Amino acid sequence: MVLQEASLELKGDLVSEITRLKLERNAIILAHNYQRPEVQDIADFVGDSLGLARTAAAADADVIIFCGVHFMAETSSILSPEKKVLIPDLNAGCSLADTITAEELRRWKKRHPGVVVVSYVNTTADVKAESDYCCTSTNAVKVVNSIPADKEVLLVPDIYLGAYVERMTGRRMHLWPGQCHVHAKLTPEAITRLRDERPNAEFLIHPECGCITNAMYYLGEGKISGKGTHILSTDGMLKCARNSTSTEFIVATETGILHQLTKQNPGKQFFPAKDDAVCEYMKMITLQKVHYSLRDMIHEVKVPAAIAGKARLALERMVSVN
Ligand code: SF4
Protein backbone atom coordinates (compact mmCIF):
# COMPACT_ATOMS: atom_id res chain seq x y z
CA MET A 1 0.00 0.00 0.00
CA VAL A 2 2.79 2.40 0.98
CA LEU A 3 4.67 1.45 -2.18
CA GLN A 4 1.60 2.07 -4.34
CA GLU A 5 1.11 5.55 -2.83
CA ALA A 6 4.77 6.36 -3.35
CA SER A 7 4.58 5.36 -7.03
CA LEU A 8 1.44 7.46 -7.52
CA GLU A 9 3.23 10.42 -5.97
CA LEU A 10 6.18 9.81 -8.27
CA LYS A 11 3.86 9.71 -11.30
CA GLY A 12 2.28 12.98 -10.14
CA ASP A 13 5.72 14.60 -9.86
CA LEU A 14 6.65 13.37 -13.31
CA VAL A 15 3.46 14.74 -14.84
CA SER A 16 4.01 18.16 -13.16
CA GLU A 17 7.60 18.25 -14.38
CA ILE A 18 6.57 17.34 -17.94
CA THR A 19 3.90 20.07 -17.86
CA ARG A 20 6.46 22.63 -16.63
CA LEU A 21 9.03 21.67 -19.28
CA LYS A 22 6.39 21.74 -22.02
CA LEU A 23 5.66 25.40 -21.29
CA GLU A 24 9.35 26.27 -21.00
CA ARG A 25 10.16 24.68 -24.38
CA ASN A 26 6.94 25.76 -26.13
CA ALA A 27 6.32 22.08 -26.86
CA ILE A 28 3.23 20.00 -27.49
CA ILE A 29 2.82 16.31 -26.83
CA LEU A 30 1.10 14.19 -29.48
CA ALA A 31 0.13 10.61 -28.71
CA HIS A 32 -1.07 7.86 -30.99
CA ASN A 33 -4.19 5.90 -29.95
CA TYR A 34 -2.06 2.82 -29.35
CA GLN A 35 0.07 4.48 -26.68
CA ARG A 36 -0.01 3.51 -23.01
CA PRO A 37 -2.99 5.08 -21.14
CA GLU A 38 -0.76 7.30 -18.96
CA VAL A 39 1.00 8.67 -22.06
CA GLN A 40 -2.35 9.36 -23.76
CA ASP A 41 -3.46 11.18 -20.59
CA ILE A 42 -0.62 13.74 -20.67
CA ALA A 43 -0.93 14.38 -24.42
CA ASP A 44 -2.32 17.61 -25.90
CA PHE A 45 -3.77 15.58 -28.76
CA VAL A 46 -4.48 11.86 -29.16
CA GLY A 47 -5.30 10.50 -32.60
CA ASP A 48 -4.39 8.38 -35.59
CA SER A 49 -1.18 8.86 -37.57
CA LEU A 50 -2.61 11.30 -40.10
CA GLY A 51 -4.41 13.30 -37.40
CA LEU A 52 -1.15 13.56 -35.49
CA ALA A 53 0.81 14.73 -38.55
CA ARG A 54 -1.83 17.36 -39.35
CA THR A 55 -1.95 18.57 -35.74
CA ALA A 56 1.85 18.81 -35.67
CA ALA A 57 1.83 20.93 -38.83
CA ALA A 58 -0.88 23.28 -37.55
CA ALA A 59 0.47 23.64 -34.00
CA ASP A 60 1.96 26.91 -32.81
CA ALA A 61 4.85 25.13 -31.10
CA ASP A 62 8.63 24.91 -31.50
CA VAL A 63 8.92 21.34 -30.32
CA ILE A 64 6.78 18.26 -30.98
CA ILE A 65 7.12 15.35 -28.56
CA PHE A 66 5.88 12.56 -30.78
CA CYS A 67 4.59 9.55 -28.84
CA GLY A 68 4.14 7.01 -31.61
CA VAL A 69 6.44 4.99 -33.86
CA HIS A 70 9.37 6.22 -35.92
CA PHE A 71 7.81 6.39 -39.40
CA MET A 72 4.97 8.51 -37.97
CA ALA A 73 7.44 10.93 -36.40
CA GLU A 74 9.18 11.13 -39.79
CA THR A 75 5.87 12.07 -41.43
CA SER A 76 5.44 14.87 -38.89
CA SER A 77 8.98 16.08 -39.56
CA ILE A 78 8.30 16.06 -43.34
CA LEU A 79 5.12 18.10 -42.92
CA SER A 80 6.61 20.44 -40.26
CA PRO A 81 10.24 20.96 -41.29
CA GLU A 82 10.60 24.11 -39.18
CA LYS A 83 9.75 22.28 -35.93
CA LYS A 84 11.94 20.05 -33.80
CA VAL A 85 10.33 16.60 -33.68
CA LEU A 86 11.48 14.39 -30.81
CA ILE A 87 10.53 10.76 -30.26
CA PRO A 88 10.99 9.55 -26.67
CA ASP A 89 12.45 6.21 -27.81
CA LEU A 90 14.30 5.90 -31.11
CA ASN A 91 13.79 2.13 -31.09
CA ALA A 92 10.02 2.49 -31.45
CA GLY A 93 9.90 1.06 -34.98
CA CYS A 94 7.31 -0.88 -36.98
CA SER A 95 7.55 -4.49 -38.14
CA LEU A 96 5.46 -3.67 -41.23
CA ALA A 97 7.53 -0.64 -42.29
CA ASP A 98 10.66 -2.79 -41.83
CA THR A 99 9.54 -5.26 -44.53
CA ILE A 100 10.72 -2.99 -47.34
CA THR A 101 13.74 -0.74 -47.85
CA ALA A 102 14.20 2.05 -50.40
CA GLU A 103 16.97 0.00 -52.04
CA GLU A 104 14.68 -3.02 -52.51
CA LEU A 105 11.99 -0.78 -53.96
CA ARG A 106 14.45 0.88 -56.39
CA ARG A 107 15.60 -2.56 -57.59
CA TRP A 108 11.99 -3.65 -58.07
CA LYS A 109 11.10 -0.48 -59.99
CA LYS A 110 14.04 -1.05 -62.36
CA ARG A 111 12.54 -4.39 -63.35
CA HIS A 112 9.08 -2.80 -63.92
CA PRO A 113 9.63 0.53 -65.70
CA GLY A 114 6.57 2.82 -65.71
CA VAL A 115 4.94 1.17 -62.68
CA VAL A 116 3.00 3.46 -60.31
CA VAL A 117 4.04 2.87 -56.70
CA VAL A 118 1.45 3.35 -53.97
CA SER A 119 2.87 3.08 -50.48
CA TYR A 120 0.88 2.71 -47.33
CA VAL A 121 1.77 5.39 -44.76
CA ASN A 122 3.40 2.65 -42.67
CA THR A 123 6.68 3.05 -44.55
CA THR A 124 9.92 4.90 -43.90
CA ALA A 125 10.51 8.36 -45.41
CA ASP A 126 13.07 6.78 -47.80
CA VAL A 127 10.40 4.43 -49.19
CA LYS A 128 7.84 7.24 -49.44
CA ALA A 129 10.40 9.24 -51.45
CA GLU A 130 10.52 6.37 -53.98
CA SER A 131 6.70 6.26 -54.22
CA ASP A 132 4.23 8.09 -56.46
CA TYR A 133 1.42 8.10 -53.92
CA CYS A 134 0.99 7.40 -50.25
CA CYS A 135 -2.31 6.05 -48.94
CA THR A 136 -4.00 5.25 -45.67
CA SER A 137 -6.07 2.13 -45.18
CA THR A 138 -9.14 4.39 -45.38
CA ASN A 139 -8.36 5.96 -48.75
CA ALA A 140 -6.29 3.20 -50.44
CA VAL A 141 -9.23 2.19 -52.68
CA LYS A 142 -9.79 5.80 -53.78
CA VAL A 143 -6.08 6.34 -54.45
CA VAL A 144 -5.86 3.23 -56.64
CA ASN A 145 -9.08 4.14 -58.47
CA SER A 146 -7.59 7.57 -59.27
CA ILE A 147 -4.72 5.94 -61.24
CA PRO A 148 -5.43 5.38 -64.97
CA ALA A 149 -6.58 1.80 -65.59
CA ASP A 150 -3.80 1.08 -68.12
CA LYS A 151 -1.06 1.68 -65.53
CA GLU A 152 0.67 -1.13 -63.65
CA VAL A 153 0.42 -0.56 -59.89
CA LEU A 154 2.62 -1.83 -57.09
CA LEU A 155 1.17 -1.51 -53.58
CA VAL A 156 3.68 -1.73 -50.71
CA PRO A 157 4.23 -3.07 -48.12
CA ASP A 158 1.04 -4.57 -46.64
CA ILE A 159 -0.16 -7.66 -48.51
CA TYR A 160 -3.52 -7.73 -46.68
CA LEU A 161 -4.31 -4.13 -47.53
CA GLY A 162 -3.23 -4.87 -51.12
CA ALA A 163 -5.52 -7.93 -51.35
CA TYR A 164 -8.41 -5.91 -49.89
CA VAL A 165 -7.86 -3.10 -52.43
CA GLU A 166 -7.65 -5.63 -55.29
CA ARG A 167 -11.01 -7.05 -54.25
CA MET A 168 -12.68 -3.65 -53.86
CA THR A 169 -11.34 -2.20 -57.12
CA GLY A 170 -11.41 -5.39 -59.19
CA ARG A 171 -7.93 -4.49 -60.38
CA ARG A 172 -4.90 -6.79 -60.45
CA MET A 173 -1.85 -5.23 -58.86
CA HIS A 174 1.63 -6.20 -57.77
CA LEU A 175 1.63 -6.67 -54.00
CA TRP A 176 4.59 -6.54 -51.66
CA PRO A 177 4.53 -9.53 -49.26
CA GLY A 178 4.83 -7.48 -46.03
CA GLN A 179 2.70 -7.76 -42.93
CA CYS A 180 2.50 -6.52 -39.35
CA HIS A 181 3.33 -9.01 -36.61
CA VAL A 182 0.37 -7.84 -34.47
CA HIS A 183 -2.32 -8.70 -36.99
CA ALA A 184 -1.20 -12.32 -37.22
CA LYS A 185 -2.97 -12.63 -33.86
CA LEU A 186 -6.34 -11.44 -35.24
CA THR A 187 -7.65 -14.57 -36.97
CA PRO A 188 -11.20 -14.86 -38.42
CA GLU A 189 -11.84 -17.80 -36.04
CA ALA A 190 -10.95 -15.74 -32.96
CA ILE A 191 -13.12 -12.84 -34.14
CA THR A 192 -16.10 -15.09 -34.95
CA ARG A 193 -15.83 -16.91 -31.61
CA LEU A 194 -15.94 -13.64 -29.66
CA ARG A 195 -18.84 -12.32 -31.71
CA ASP A 196 -20.79 -15.54 -31.11
CA GLU A 197 -20.25 -15.09 -27.37
CA ARG A 198 -21.63 -11.51 -27.53
CA PRO A 199 -24.31 -11.53 -30.23
CA ASN A 200 -25.65 -8.06 -29.28
CA ALA A 201 -22.30 -6.34 -29.52
CA GLU A 202 -21.50 -4.06 -32.43
CA PHE A 203 -18.26 -4.86 -34.21
CA LEU A 204 -15.93 -1.93 -34.84
CA ILE A 205 -12.90 -2.15 -37.13
CA HIS A 206 -10.37 0.63 -36.92
CA PRO A 207 -8.43 0.68 -40.18
CA GLU A 208 -5.48 2.65 -38.82
CA CYS A 209 -2.56 0.35 -38.94
CA GLY A 210 -1.21 -2.84 -40.38
CA CYS A 211 -2.51 -4.65 -37.32
CA ILE A 212 -6.05 -4.51 -38.74
CA THR A 213 -5.81 -4.72 -42.51
CA ASN A 214 -6.32 -8.48 -42.33
CA ALA A 215 -9.70 -7.95 -40.60
CA MET A 216 -10.70 -5.75 -43.57
CA TYR A 217 -9.48 -8.47 -45.90
CA TYR A 218 -11.48 -11.19 -44.05
CA LEU A 219 -14.57 -8.98 -44.24
CA GLY A 220 -14.06 -8.48 -47.99
CA GLU A 221 -13.66 -12.25 -48.43
CA GLY A 222 -16.81 -12.94 -46.34
CA LYS A 223 -14.75 -14.83 -43.74
CA ILE A 224 -16.26 -12.68 -40.97
CA SER A 225 -19.84 -11.42 -40.85
CA GLY A 226 -20.67 -7.90 -42.02
CA LYS A 227 -23.72 -7.71 -39.72
CA GLY A 228 -23.36 -4.90 -37.14
CA THR A 229 -19.87 -4.23 -38.50
CA HIS A 230 -18.48 -0.72 -38.98
CA ILE A 231 -15.13 0.28 -40.47
CA LEU A 232 -14.39 3.60 -38.78
CA SER A 233 -11.70 6.20 -38.26
CA THR A 234 -10.74 7.12 -34.70
CA ASP A 235 -13.24 9.97 -34.59
CA GLY A 236 -15.89 7.84 -36.29
CA MET A 237 -15.35 5.09 -33.74
CA LEU A 238 -15.67 7.44 -30.78
CA LYS A 239 -18.80 8.99 -32.31
CA CYS A 240 -20.35 5.58 -33.09
CA ALA A 241 -19.75 4.35 -29.51
CA ARG A 242 -21.26 7.59 -28.12
CA ASN A 243 -24.35 7.62 -30.33
CA SER A 244 -25.12 3.90 -30.48
CA THR A 245 -27.83 2.40 -28.29
CA SER A 246 -25.68 -0.70 -27.92
CA THR A 247 -23.84 -1.11 -24.67
CA GLU A 248 -21.35 -3.70 -25.90
CA PHE A 249 -18.73 -3.33 -28.60
CA ILE A 250 -16.06 -5.64 -29.93
CA VAL A 251 -13.15 -3.65 -31.21
CA ALA A 252 -10.74 -5.01 -33.79
CA THR A 253 -7.57 -3.02 -33.48
CA GLU A 254 -4.53 -2.67 -31.28
CA THR A 255 -5.83 -2.61 -27.70
CA GLY A 256 -4.59 0.95 -26.94
CA ILE A 257 -7.69 2.58 -28.43
CA LEU A 258 -9.87 1.02 -25.75
CA HIS A 259 -8.54 3.61 -23.29
CA GLN A 260 -10.25 6.57 -25.02
CA LEU A 261 -13.40 4.56 -25.79
CA THR A 262 -13.80 3.51 -22.15
CA LYS A 263 -12.89 6.95 -20.81
CA GLN A 264 -15.44 8.72 -22.99
CA ASN A 265 -18.26 6.18 -22.59
CA PRO A 266 -18.80 5.21 -18.96
CA GLY A 267 -21.45 2.52 -18.71
CA LYS A 268 -20.55 0.93 -22.03
CA GLN A 269 -18.30 -2.08 -22.43
CA PHE A 270 -15.55 -2.53 -24.98
CA PHE A 271 -13.89 -5.86 -25.70
CA PRO A 272 -10.73 -6.25 -27.74
CA ALA A 273 -11.13 -8.70 -30.63
CA LYS A 274 -7.91 -10.21 -29.28
CA ASP A 275 -6.49 -9.02 -25.98
CA ASP A 276 -2.91 -9.80 -26.94
CA ALA A 277 -3.14 -7.63 -30.08
CA VAL A 278 -0.55 -5.31 -28.62
CA CYS A 279 2.13 -3.42 -30.52
CA GLU A 280 5.28 -3.63 -28.43
CA TYR A 281 6.85 -0.79 -30.40
CA MET A 282 4.06 1.61 -29.43
CA LYS A 283 4.39 0.58 -25.81
CA MET A 284 8.12 1.43 -25.73
CA ILE A 285 7.19 5.04 -25.00
CA THR A 286 6.83 5.65 -21.26
CA LEU A 287 6.21 8.77 -19.16
CA GLN A 288 9.81 8.57 -17.96
CA LYS A 289 11.12 8.61 -21.55
CA VAL A 290 8.81 11.52 -22.45
CA HIS A 291 10.34 13.39 -19.52
CA TYR A 292 13.96 12.63 -20.55
CA SER A 293 13.30 13.57 -24.14
CA LEU A 294 11.73 16.90 -23.19
CA ARG A 295 14.27 17.69 -20.48
CA ASP A 296 17.38 16.90 -22.54
CA MET A 297 15.86 17.66 -25.96
CA ILE A 298 17.04 14.25 -27.22
CA HIS A 299 16.06 11.78 -29.97
CA GLU A 300 15.31 14.18 -32.79
CA VAL A 301 13.75 12.74 -35.96
CA LYS A 302 14.86 14.80 -38.94
CA VAL A 303 14.35 13.77 -42.55
CA PRO A 304 17.02 15.11 -44.97
CA ALA A 305 15.57 17.85 -47.22
CA ALA A 306 16.04 15.93 -50.50
CA ILE A 307 14.18 12.87 -49.19
CA ALA A 308 11.56 15.00 -47.41
CA GLY A 309 10.77 16.93 -50.62
CA LYS A 310 10.03 13.77 -52.62
CA ALA A 311 8.16 12.08 -49.76
CA ARG A 312 6.06 15.23 -49.24
CA LEU A 313 4.89 15.03 -52.84
CA ALA A 314 3.60 11.47 -52.34
CA LEU A 315 1.91 12.52 -49.09
CA GLU A 316 0.31 15.57 -50.71
CA ARG A 317 -1.10 13.38 -53.50
CA MET A 318 -2.59 11.13 -50.83
CA VAL A 319 -4.28 14.09 -49.12
CA SER A 320 -5.56 15.48 -52.44
CA VAL A 321 -7.35 12.18 -53.20
CA ASN A 322 -9.09 12.23 -49.78
S1 SF4 B 1 0.65 -2.18 -34.93
FE1 SF4 B 1 1.89 -3.14 -36.58
S2 SF4 B 1 1.77 -1.73 -38.30
FE2 SF4 B 1 1.11 -0.58 -36.45
S3 SF4 B 1 2.99 0.39 -35.66
FE3 SF4 B 1 2.79 -1.59 -34.60
S4 SF4 B 1 4.03 -2.99 -35.85
FE4 SF4 B 1 3.60 -1.21 -37.12
Image (cartoon, rainbow, N blue to C red):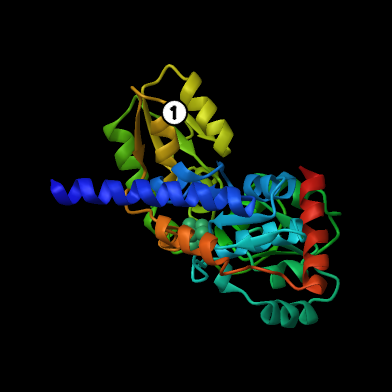
**Residue 260: % across, % down:** 44, 36
Quarter of the image containing the C terminus? top right
**Residue 306: % across, % down:** 82, 73
Q: Is residue 195 above or below residue 213?
A: above
- Taking the image as shown, residue 109 lies to the left or right of residue 157, namely right
Residue at mark 1: 264
Q: Is residue 278 above or below residue 206?
A: below
User: Looking at this view, is 204 or 219 the one in front?
Assistant: 204
- Taking the image as shown, residue 48 lies to the left or right of residue 203, namely right
Residue at x-position 41% and y-position 25%: 265
Q: Is residue 308 above or below residue 279?
A: below
- Taking the image as shown, residue 238 lies to the left or right of residue 256, namely right
Q: Is residue 131 above or below residue 274?
A: below
**Residue 262: % across, % down:** 38, 32
Residue at x-position 56% and y-position 42%: 44
Would you identify the image quadrant in which residue 251 lies? top left
Q: Is any atom of residue 111 visible in this view? A: yes
Residue at x-position 51% and y-position 30%: 238
Q: Amino acid at mark 1?
A: Gln
